[in-house]
Image: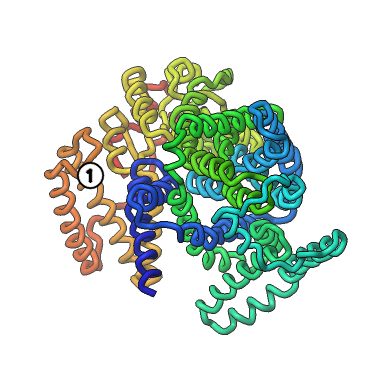
Amino acid sequence: MGGVLVQAFIYLCAAVVAVPIAKRLGLGSVLGYLIAGIVIGPVLGVVGAETAEIQHFAELGVVMMLFLVGLELEPRLLWDMRARLLGLGGLQVGLTVLVIAAAGFVLGVSWSIALAAGLILSLSSTAIVLQTLSEKGLVKTSGGQSSFAVLLFQDIAVIPMLALLPLLAIPELTGLADHGASNATEHHHLSLVDGLSGWTYALVVLGAVAMVVLGGHFLSRPLFRFIAASGLREIFTAAALLLVIGIALLMTLVDLSPALGTFLAGVVLANSEFRHELESDIEPFKGLLLGLFFITVGAGIDFAILMQSPGTLLGLTVGLIAAKALILFALARLFRLERGGDWLFTLGLAQAGEFGFVLLAFSVQAHVLPVDLAKTLSLVVALSMLLTPALFILYERWILPGLERTAKLPPDTIDEQGTVVIAGVGRFGQIVNRLLVASGVRTVVLDHAAAQIDILRKLGIKSWFGDATRPDLLHAAGMDAAAVLVVAIDDRERAVDLVAYARRRYPKVKILARAFDVNHLYLLKKAGADVAIRELFDASLNLGAEALRTLGVHPFKVEKMTRAFRLHDAQGLDEMYELWDLDPDLSRNRALLARVREHGGSLQEAMAAERMDLHDRTERGWTPPPKDYTSALQGEAPADEASSQTRHDIRHD
């Protein structure tokens, strides 16, 4: 018991320290787990041989991840991606096996060993790639979907590989399997299909798959309803774990991939009313076990072998990544993946995968690979997995910005002009445009996202593709005659630059800008914005007011308190702007922090006064607009006059 607690403490301590630091440095959690494993394993040596045993247990994290992925996919969506699943996945595995096997044969390795190495190294890391894509929000992109299709095909391909590898056995290899192989023997010891004939084995496998599909469809719902009726959340969690582990065990007993079996069960349950409960119950276990799996991969790296021939091992690792990347990039072009998605697809899948460890152990057990060569290939697999986060960083920080800069799509020719020019029609700019157009105001809408423009045009909203920060495009949009420029682009820095340029070039145009937070609001104000609105302020205030009404506060009081909060906040913003500076680290501005604390205290006093005062002496009657207000908006009056009608003092929100 004491030993288990010590091991648990070491693994958890390494994860708690390394992962937040890696995330803070922008390296991602996967690299943090791998580094944690390297530190407690090869570097400090506080964990040892038990790492291999723990890794078998931690592989349940991969199984649970595939189950959760299956829950997100309906059978119809799976059918829709059949072309990428079979085309991309089949060609990737086939071409990679051929290239690696040919390279091994050229280097003097026997054809059977070369072919086995090709099969093992053709697989990519489902755990690392899907976890990283999920963290970075890239799963739904073209590159992310194509990567998922290939990974799914690879998981399926493990089954025929397990059947094919024993046929490549070398009679001369009669030595005992190494420690990893013995573990693999124990791992595969329980089996329902050992010694069965071919057709009997096929029947058993089909029966197991049918049991998963039919059981998931007909038995899971009444079972979960019965358990949910008990009202015991922990029993529902236990049932969810029982489902996943039970399916993984069944697949193992018939020599199928546990990950593939749970993925199939997830797809069957994708339309279940208990889908979200299953996701929420399994997600924490999946995250912890996946993290444990990555730690064991890092701890299992044998640096002694690496030190014996570092050049050879690093050369093999870089060569493997380069060869797979070339094949993946060629396939991305062949299947016409969209710009940017092709590089994500290429760099994301260029490593070897965790199933490689399983196949290596199985190959040694089946006398296909010598033990020394299996250890070398294990290190190549681990090093390539260790380099994967760096490939994602390469994509995000160098390749993607370069693609955006070199985008050569020509901007649209703008053939209309309006009273208001709107730069950026994402979730914020769209609402502004809809309100203005519905009110009869002519607008010119610009956005540099071609896909967004296509969607707007399909919805009947006239818009133009182009970078609104380009001076020639602003001129073509009619800024010389416009009354208002609305800046709602998603890039903070470009928004500030656009405001500064428009202020210098078009001093008579009123500039209204969307701010992400207070610091961005001050930057926009300093750049020359007439009005800057924090995008979440009004929505948050409205939701807070609704919460007060829900708690039983009278609507009249809620209205007064909301207005008092708004006025107090606006006054505080003006006062704090005098203390604000361009240093992005606000924690170093002690005077500003002191003023913020003082502002919070005075807010409570102001709100308390409003709660006690039942009469509003500041209420003013509604003042109608002047007679020529509408004509000014429609552009019938000169621009200067129209601008003067709408010019107000700087207001923040």
Q: Kindly identify the residue that appears in the image at 70 percent across and 35 percent down.
A: 110
Q: Is residue 294 above or below residue 483?
A: below
Relative to residue 68, is residue 518 drawn left or right? left
In the image, residue 380 lies at what x, y percent? 53, 39
Q: Kindly identify the residue that appears in the image at 60 percent across and 47 percent down.
A: 356
Identify the image's colour scheme: rainbow, by chain, secondary structure or one colour.
rainbow
In the image, residue 336 lies at what x, y percent? 68, 29
Dividing the image into 4 quarters, which one contains the N terminus? bottom left
Residue under pointer 1: 573
Q: Looking at the picture, which amino acid does disc 1 mark?
A: Leu
Neighbourhood count class around disc 1 (C-alpha, 10 Å): few under 14, some 14–19, many 20 upward: many
Whether residue 414 is visible here, answered yes or no, is: no
In the image, residue 500 lies at what x, y percent? 32, 24
Q: Is residue 523 above or below residue 354?
A: above
Residue sticking out furthest to the right: 199
In the image, residue 130 lies at what x, y percent? 56, 48
Q: Kindly identify the residue that appears in the image at 28 percent across and 33 percent down.
A: 523
Query: Residue 376 occupies which quadrant of the picture?
Result: top right
In the image shown, does 376 or 345 lie closer to the viewer? 376
In the image shown, does 489 or 558 lie closer to the viewer? 489
In the image shown, does 401 or 651 lie closer to the viewer? 401
